[in-house]
Image: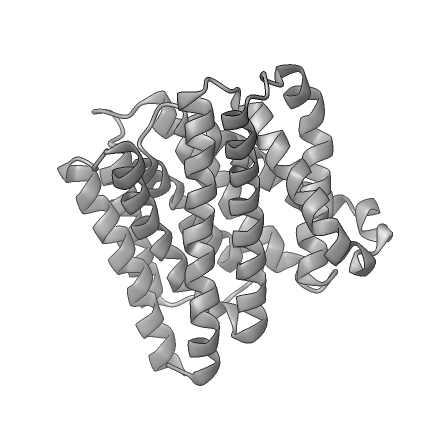
Amino acid sequence: MRSDTLRALPLMLLAMALIPAGDTAGKLLTGGEGVAPLWVAFSRFALGAVILAPFVLHITPPRIFLDWRIWLRALFIAGGIVSILTALKTEPIANVFGAFFVGPILSWLLSVWLLREGFSWPRLGLVCLGFLGVILVVKPGFGMTPGLGFAVLAGIFYGAFLTASRWLAGVARPRALLMSQLVIGALVLAPLGLPQTPEITARVGWLTLASALGSMLGNLCLILALRMAPASRLAPFVYTQLIAATSLGWLVFGVWPDALAFAGLVILLVSGLASLGLRERAD
């Protein structure tokens, strides 16, 4: 493993722990406190934008908000957040993340098709293996629930978002793109989320803040890591979110995936990390 990857790895792993931590807070809000997923999603974007603005607003050119592609990218991530929070209301967090990982699979396929990125048969084999893992988690036709359907929908939105992010990589700085998605997400979700504002108790308040901070800081750590090492080298470590999600599901909710779902999570993790070996050999 190259030195730049080793330097970026701690930030990458921190990002992959913070994002499921934010979603754990979101699950405590939607499942435990009965807060509407739309309000949690809106507050996540709005608070993230407010917290990040002093550090990023000066490098965010206003012109990017006039670009329809920026809005499309933001709509993809907004749809993904709403869908995953809806899924978390009823489903174990590890299973939701397992189903959600249809996203990176779809992103690779879309990138090969639409962006003409490199194709390789070994990589396709790992993608198919990963898809098998998703199937074991979701159990379509024999145990699939509406919640897991929303998790798959979240993954589809996220796969489209990842492809759009690659497509627009040269339009603005990564931190400016992050700011744009937070601002647009808050604007789009405000009419839907604000009418469902809950009673702001101390517990709802700190969980809302934790949900927003986990998501925003996780994405910021991811951006910083990607400045230190190529995305192609760090991408396999996205799958370590599965470890964090499974651990948090057990620690916070006392829930462990059933045998089929656990097998699917292991397959997803192995297929994701195995792609690192492909890249190392390619270099």
Q: Is residue 48 left or right of residue 202?
A: right
User: Residue 131: horizontal and vertical position, in percent?
Assistant: 30, 47
Q: Residue furthest front?
A: 202
User: Residue 172: horizontal and vertical position, in percent?
Assistant: 74, 61
Q: Nearer the viewer, residue 204 or 67?
A: 204
User: Residue 247: horizontal and vertical position, in percent?
Assistant: 28, 46
Report if residue 193 is visible in the image.
yes
Q: Is residue 160 left or right of residue 119?
A: right
Vertical order, 162 against 35 (above or below): below
User: Residue 41: horizontal and vertical position, in percent?
Assistant: 58, 31
Residue 155 appears in which quarter of the rendering? top left
Residue at image position (54%, 30%) is 82
Vertical order, 109 against 195 (above or below): below
Residue 262 appears in which quarter of the rendering? top left
Quarter of the image for the N terminus: give it.
bottom left
Q: Is residue 216 left or right of residue 24?
A: right
Vertical order, 14 against 186 (above or below): below
Quarter of the image for the C terminus: give it.
bottom left
Residue at image position (32%, 43%) is 248
Residue at image position (73%, 57%) is 55
Q: Is residue 224 left or right of residue 12?
A: right
